[in-house]
Amino acid sequence: MNDDVQLNARQEMDMLVADSLKKSKAKPNVAFAKLSDLSKVMSKGIVEWSRVNSLWPLQFGLACCAMELMDFGSARVDAERKGFLLFRATPRQADVMLVAGWVTKSMVPEVKRLYEQMSQPRYVIAFGECATCGGPWWESYNIIKGIDQVLPVDVYVAGCPPRPENLFSALMKLQKKVGGKIEY
Ligand code: SF4
């Protein structure tokens, strides 16, 4: 470096980086490009981690499966250990819809409205046979053959009634899906 030339801090830093990168033959702007991307990468990971660990279900039930949903909140299941018990009374603070029970055709617009009011990204769990396929009411004139006819379902829970433990397992599966560990 010529000692007569006065460099400002930015020029000095550019020169130092260029000198150090000559050894690895990388382009001079690689280090800065990585620094600028670092915040994006870090925030992406934090946002993903927060989403995985803060699944907040909407508090509502449609039929007898809702009894199992109440049992899910009991000490026996202890769903709180995974943070699954933050049931929200308003859809704007919830991101998981647990469809517990059969859905009548007259209830479809209301369930869809609740779903649309939920914060994004939002997820749906079909809890039990009725929410999955209509269950015992398969041939009913007024009950739809599964909530997936009107909403995108992420996880299905089998059973009539389904066990609360299965809901625990479904939420853990949903965590994996939200975290990008499984796709289906
Ligand atoms: S799946 Fe069985 S327990 Fe659940 S709502 Fe339907 S009939 Fe009731």
Image: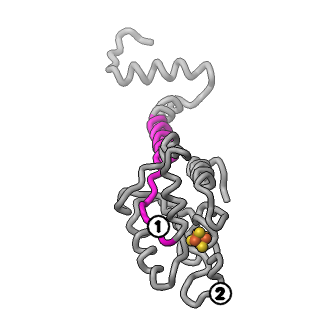
Residue 96 is left or right of residue 145, and the answer is left
Judged from the image, the secondary structure of the residue bearing numbered disc 1 is: loop
Instruction: Where is residue 97? Give x, y as percent.
Output: 48, 63
Q: Nearer the viewer, residue 165 or 74?
A: 74
Instruction: Where is residue 9? Give x, y as percent.
Output: 34, 20
Count of all numbered marks drawn on residues in the image: 2
Query: Is the residue 103 above or below the residue 120 in the image?
Result: below
Judged from the image, the secondary structure of the residue bearing numbered disc 2 is: loop
The residue lying at 40 percent from left, 63 percent from top is 118
Q: Residues within 10 Å of mark 2 (few under 14, many from 20)?
A: few
The residue lying at 58 percent from left, 78 percent from top is 149
Name the residue that disc number 1 marks. Answer: 61
Asked if residue 106 is among those painted magenta in the image, a careful observer would answer no
**Tag 2: amino acid:** Glu
Q: Main SS type for the magenta part?
A: helix
Residue 95 visible in rendering:
yes
- Distance, label 2 to label 1, CA atoms, is 22 Å
Name the residue that disc number 2 marks. Answer: 139
Query: Is the residue 178 above or below the residue 117 in the image?
Result: above
**Tag 1: amino acid:** Gly
Mark 2 residue's CB less than 8 Å from ligand 1 = no
Residue that protrudes farthest toward the top in the picture: 3
Residue that protrudes farthest toward the bottom in the picture: 141
